[in-house]
Image: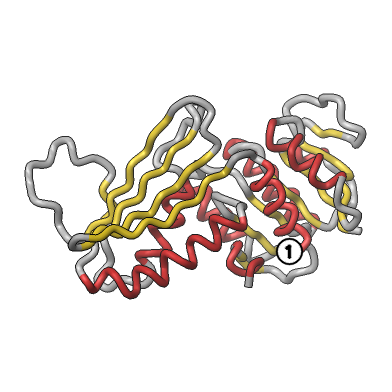
Amino acid sequence: MTRIILGGCNGKMGHTVRSIVDENPDAEVIAGIDISEGDAKFPVFTDAGACNVDADVIIDFSAPAALDGILRLAVENNIPAVLCATGYSQDQLDDIEEASRRVAILRSANMSLGINILAKLVTEAAQVLADKGYDIEIVERHHNLKADAPSGTALILADAINSVLDPKYEYVYDRSERRMKRPKKEIGISAVRGGTIVGDHDVIFAGLDEVIELKHSAYSKAVFAKGAVGAALFLADKPAGMYSMKDVIG
């Protein structure tokens, strides 16, 4: 049985993770961390530093503001941590990297198995199509409450593509002030915000007289929760280091 501490346990994603874990006989949420105690059946700590339960792994779906406490809890108690929040600053990313030298850390802006498979597919496509003159564009769509843009997932996909390109392509987020022909060595990234869209990501390879599109659509937050629980089960017994969903899917 893998014992989980759940950061952000009373938020929307926290409740979704709890329901996924309830259906998994190999996992159990034994404590939570949140700004309010809520109505959970397990103890909830409003301060990560006060969490004193023995656990095998942390799943954090809270917010960047909670990162310091989560990392301190993980490092001081040698508890691997799955970090699922988006919008970390560069200083926070550096803190995560430093913590991974002492404890196992898995960070992903998107825990969906499908998105991580898509990242592999677009990498393979880019290796063939970029040299053939195909232009590369990414369009992401999310609900109207999402604060950051572009999405962390769009950047995951762009980074996956760029990892196999030489020279590296420039990311372009806005062409409204440009009056020029589209350069070849760029990846355009566009963000749409509206309604209750959970998450859509299109990767477009546009060539001469043909277009190839690779697409992922999430219809509920359950896909992210399920991926996070799978990542936690994978990470629970791993040595210190930085891991990603690539390691989980193999």
Q: Determine whether, in the image, residue 39 is placed left or right of residue 231.
A: right
Q: Position of residue 169 (x, y in %)?
A: 26, 62
Circle 1 SS class: helix
Residue 52 occupies which quadrant of the picture? Answer: top right
Relative depth, front residue between 193 and 27: 193
In the image, residue 17 above or below residue 216: above
User: Mark 1 — residue?
Assistant: 235
The chosen color scheme is secondary structure
Q: Position of residue 225 (x, y in %)?
A: 70, 46
Which residue: 51% across, 55% down?
A: 94
User: Which quarter of the rendered picture does the N terminus lie within?
Assistant: bottom right
Residue 108 occupies which quadrant of the picture? Answer: bottom right
Q: Position of residue 214 (x, y in %)?
A: 42, 57
Which residue: 64% across, 40% down?
A: 221
Which residue: 87% across, 57% down?
A: 2
Which amino acid is tagged 1? Leu
Q: Determine whether, in the image, residue 172 is placed left or right of residue 181.
A: right
Q: Is residue 81 visible?
A: yes
- Count of numbered tags: 1
Relative depth, front residue between 239 and 232: 232
Which residue: 66% across, 66% down?
A: 248
Q: Residue furthest front?
A: 209
User: Which quarter of the rendered picture does the C terminus lie within?
Assistant: bottom right
